[in-house]
Image (tube, rainbow, N blue to C red):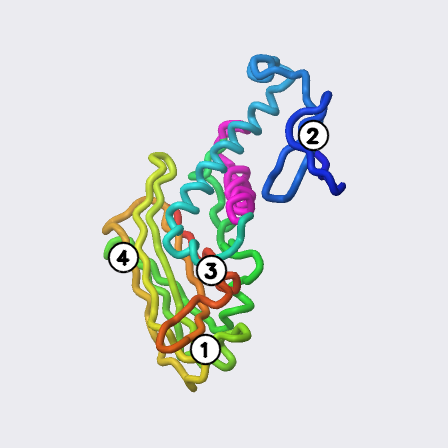
């Protein structure tokens, strides 16, 4: 697949070339003579069908994660968020050591491949939030806690130019990959002034279904604001906000 680089942009089909627009720009590809029925039945395309099946599962998993955390991730600016997430869920599917190729499932994979996923590729959490934190999950009690020590905003937070305040956000969700359902909970702190000397130690406590046996996914982020006449506005419309998957627990 190639990209159109000229001044004139073409849409549609010319000869055996198809021109179209994607999130990455204007692209072109060569039409293939292969039809769908042959791809589904021809033994020579067995590997292709296996890849399709697993890619489809990874895509559904990525969509479920994206929709689950949408109430907070909507405050980020990264149009390639979903395609990057599919790469991570595909890694989880491929790490399944239980099922045969083509039948591998995300539920049987290594979920460590999700930890560290950045919802905003232009602003990662690790370089934004420089304080240590601990995650405690109590399945029997139905809680997930993020324990944060005392913060010193001038050193614990990598402030964006123009920001007057920040807040911490977090979410935890029980995810059922088979039923393609999730039960999330969200929390946000108050806006903290950038010039505040310190912020007391705190626990971001989230609620989970009591006795859950499903996968638990936890995210955390930092939002930056600019205060104008007593109103708080997301800095750069959220382009500099950071949010990442910081924990996954799978029974």
> Of callouts 4 and 3, which one flags the residue occurring earlier in the amino acid sequence?
4
Q: Is residue 95 above or below residue 242?
A: above
Instruction: Give the magenta part as a residue range.
Output: 81-103
How far apart marks 1 and 3 lie (CA) works out to 19 Å
Q: CA distance from mark 4 to mark 1?
A: 30 Å
Mark 4 and mark 1 in contact? Answer it, CB < 8 Å.
no
| Pointer 1 or 3: first along the chain | 1
Residue at mark 4: 207
**SS for tag 4?**
strand
> Circles 1 and 2: CB distance less than 8 Å?
no
Counting residues from the N terminus, which is met first, the one under dot 4 or under dot 2? 2
Q: Nearer the viewer, mark 2 or mark 3?
A: 2
How much space separates mark 2 and mark 3, taking CA atoms? 35 Å
Quadrant of the image occupied by residue 192: bottom left
| Magenta span dominant secondary structure | helix
Q: The residue tagged with tag 2: helix, strand or loop?
A: strand
Residue located at (71% from left, 24% from top) = 14
* Residue underneath mark 3: 243
- Residue named by callout 2: 29
**Residue at the front extreme of this rendering:** 8
- Disc with the residue nearer the chain's start (2 vs 3): 2
Q: Quadrant of the N terminus?
A: top right
User: Residue 145, image x and y in percent?
Assistant: 33, 63
Give the secondary structure at mark 3: strand
Query: Label 4: how many residues lie within 10 Å, few (<14), some (14-19) or many (20+)?
Result: many
- Residue at mark 1 to residue at mark 2: CA–CA distance: 48 Å
Badges 1 and 3: C-beta atoms under 8 Å apart? no
* Distance from Cα at disc 4 to Cα at disc 2: 48 Å
Q: Nearer the viewer, mark 4 or mark 3?
A: 3
Depth order, front residue of 61/162 = 162
Residue 164, disc: 1
Q: Is residue 203 magenta?
A: no
């Amino acid at each position: 697949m190639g990209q159109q680089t000229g001044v004139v942009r073409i849409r549609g089909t010319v000869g055996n070339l198809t021109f179209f627009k994607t999130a990455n720009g204007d692209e072109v590809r060569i039409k293939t003579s292969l039809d769908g029925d042959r791809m589904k039945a021809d033994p020579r395309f067995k590997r292709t069908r296996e890849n399709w099946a697993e890619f489809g599962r990874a895509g559904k998993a990525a969509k479920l994660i994206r929709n689950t955390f949408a109430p907070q991730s909507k405050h980020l600016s990264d149009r390639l968020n979903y395609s990057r997430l599919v790469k991570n869920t595909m890694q989880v599917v491929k790490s399944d050591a239980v099922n045969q190729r083509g039948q591998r499932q995300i539920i049987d994979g290594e979920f460590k491949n999700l930890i560290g996923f950045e919802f905003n590729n232009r602003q990662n959490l690790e370089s934004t939030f420089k304080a240590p934190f601990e995650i405690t999950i109590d399945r029997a009690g139905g809680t997930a806690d993020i324990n944060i020590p005392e913060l010193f905003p001038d050193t614990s937070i990598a402030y964006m130019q123009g920001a007057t305040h920040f807040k911490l956000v977090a979410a935890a969700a029980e995810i059922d990959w088979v039923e393609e359902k999730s039960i999330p909970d969200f929390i946000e702190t108050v806006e903290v002034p950038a010039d505040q000397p310190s912020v007391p130690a705190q626990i971001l406590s989230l609620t989970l279904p009591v006795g859950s046996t499903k996968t638990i996914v936890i995210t955390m982020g930092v939002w930056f604001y600019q205060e104008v006449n007593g109103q708080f506005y997301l800095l750069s419309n959220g382009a500099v906000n950071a949010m990442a998957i910081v924990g996954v627990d799978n029974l």
